[in-house]
Image (cartoon, rainbow, N blue to C red):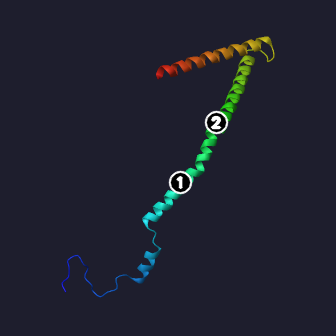
């Protein structure tokens, strides 16, 4: 019986050690890890997608309105502080004219900023 060159030589020794055999049975194959990773990724997508839809449809407009209201209140406080700083007490006609002038100044500044941004693109 002639031995082919690609066949291993049988030395009469055990082919595997018992402790290695046990480890091999508990070893997780790469394909199983990939399969579970893929399942977990799809599960995360399924859980995150409704949240993103909620944020885009429901939360975004209400957050924008809340931010606009907060900005309006901040501007009113700044106007009142500025006008009172220069001797125009709140509730007087002078104070109201001062606040209206400041609002016009802010509106023109916003228009200039928007025009500069448009010119950049």
Query: Which element is circle 2 on?
Result: helix
Q: Nearer the viewer, residue 98 or 5?
A: 5
**Percent x, y of residue 106:** 64, 18
**Percent x, y of residue 24:** 43, 75
Q: Earlier in the sequence, mark 2 or mark 1?
A: 1
Residue 54 visible in the picture: yes
Q: Which residue is mark 2?
A: 60
Q: Nearer the viewer, residue 97 or 44?
A: 44
Other-residue count near label 1 (Cα within 10 Å), few / some / many at <14 / 14–19 / ≥20 = few
In the image: residue 95, left or right of residue 39: right
Residue reaching furthest to the front: 1
- Residue 29, image quadrant: bottom left
Q: Is residue 58 above or below residue 110?
A: below
* Residue occupying the point 46% across, 60% down: 34
Using the image, tell me which numbered label, if any, was put on residue 42: 1
**Percent x, y of residue 51:** 62, 45
Q: Is residue 39 above or below residue 110?
A: below
- Separation of marks 2 and 1 at Cα, in angstroms: 25 Å
Query: Which element is circle 1 on?
Result: helix
Residue reaching furthest to the right: 91
In the image: residue 73, left or right of residue 108: right
Q: Is residue 1 above or below residue 34?
A: below
**Percent x, y of residue 49:** 58, 47
* Residue occupying the point 56% across, 17% down: 112
Q: Is residue 68 above or below residue 87?
A: below
* Quarter placement of the N terminus: bottom left
């Amino acid at each position: 019986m002639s031995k082919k060159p690609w066949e291993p030589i049988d030395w009469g020794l055990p082919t595997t050690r018992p402790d290695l055999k046990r480890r091999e049975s508990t070893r997780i194959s790469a394909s199983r890890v990939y399969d579970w990773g893929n399942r977990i990724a799809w599960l995360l997508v399924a859980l995150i997608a409704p949240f993103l839809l909620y944020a885009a449809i429901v939360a975004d407009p209400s957050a924008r309105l809340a931010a606009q209201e907060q900005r309006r209140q901040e501007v009113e406080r700044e106007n009142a502080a500025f006008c009172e700083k220069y001797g125009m007490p709140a509730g007087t006609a002078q104070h109201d004219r001062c606040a209206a002038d400041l609002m016009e100044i802010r509106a023109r500044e916003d228009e200039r900023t928007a025009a500069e941004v448009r010119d950049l693109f």
